Image: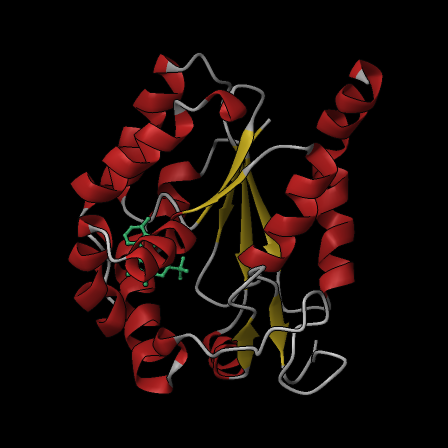
Amino acid sequence: MIILLFGPPGCGKGTQGAVITQALGVPAISTGEIFRAELKAGTPLGNAAKEIMASGGLVGDDIVNAMVSGRLHQPDCRNGFLLDGYPRTIAQAQFLDGLLKELGQPEPEILYLEVPDDVLVARLTSRRQCPVCGKIYNLLSQPPQREGVCDADGAALIQREDDQESVIRARLKAYSEQTGPLVDYYSGRKFHRIDGNRRPEEIQKDIDRLIAPALSERRQES
Ligand code: AMP
């Protein structure tokens, strides 16, 4: 099963993506996470994306498409994968359609998590992440057991630089101008709208129903 997790920054893609990929045993591919890792490692790709990410804009389509193509050609993607944060423009969506055909993969299931802007801003400003394992926390709704420290590995939690309010507003603007039109692009396909303004467990129940066929296939195989 190919899943596109789609929705504005802060809609819960990271949290839900982790649950889905664990259940299905497929890789989660987050273009934002790849850029952050490249940036941390100081690679040319990371340096090219640095300024754009800091301002809340989108990295150029050619760069992102080439990066995703390289990743999806890896053997661990053969039995399916989840994309988080890609595609984000019509050009990326068209590129992905061609790439999935080339790879002989089925039509993607598109899960669209809808959340109002004011809720997104509140969520993003209180979001914290573990720099070691990537686990995401929210100081309001999902705080760590011990303040400022990851439950899983004890690392000090950090706030992403682009989770500051001015950058968040720019990211939401980039989303509504460049990514919003994808709702029309994907309408009529396997497009599922999900109310993302609920507790993670409730959202998960909806998602479980949608991925149930792939889950039972996986159980039969093992
Ligand atoms: P995210 O963690 O998905 O919010 O991504 C963080 C940042 O990485 C975004 O604000 C963009 O600057 C960049 N980025 C991630 N994915 C893409 C993409 N598909 N197209 C363009 N830029 C991206």
Is the image coloured rainbow, by chain, by secondary structure, or in one colour?
secondary structure
Q: Which quadrant of the picture is home to ligand 1?
A: bottom left
Point 44% across, 62% down: residue: 8
Q: Quadrant of the N terminus?
A: top right
**In this picture, residue 78 sits left or right of residue 35:** right
Residue 22 appears at what percent x and percent y?
70, 42
Q: In this view, does 188 lie above or below 219?
A: below
Residue 109 drawn at (x, y percent): 55, 33
- Regarding residue 185, the answer to whether it shows in the image is yes
Q: Answer above or below: position of 211 versus 163.
A: above
Quadrant of the rendered image containing residue 62: top left
Circle count: 0
Identify the residue shown where x is 78% and y is 60%: 201
For the residue pair 198 and 167, the one nearer the viewer reads as: 167
Nearer to me, 216 or 76: 76
Q: Does residue 56 show up?
A: no
Answer with the quarter of the image where residue 114 lies.
bottom right
Kindly identify the residue that appears in the image at 53 percent across and 25 percent down.
76
x and y percent of residue 128 in the render? 54, 76
Quarter of the figure that contains the C terminus? top right
Identified at 51% across, 19% down, the residue is 106
In the displayed structure, would residue 214 be above or below residue 137?
above
Q: In the shown orientation, is residue 65 left or right of residue 132?
A: left
Q: Quadrant of residue 198?
A: bottom right
Point out residue 14 in the picture as x, y percentages from the top left corner: 56, 57
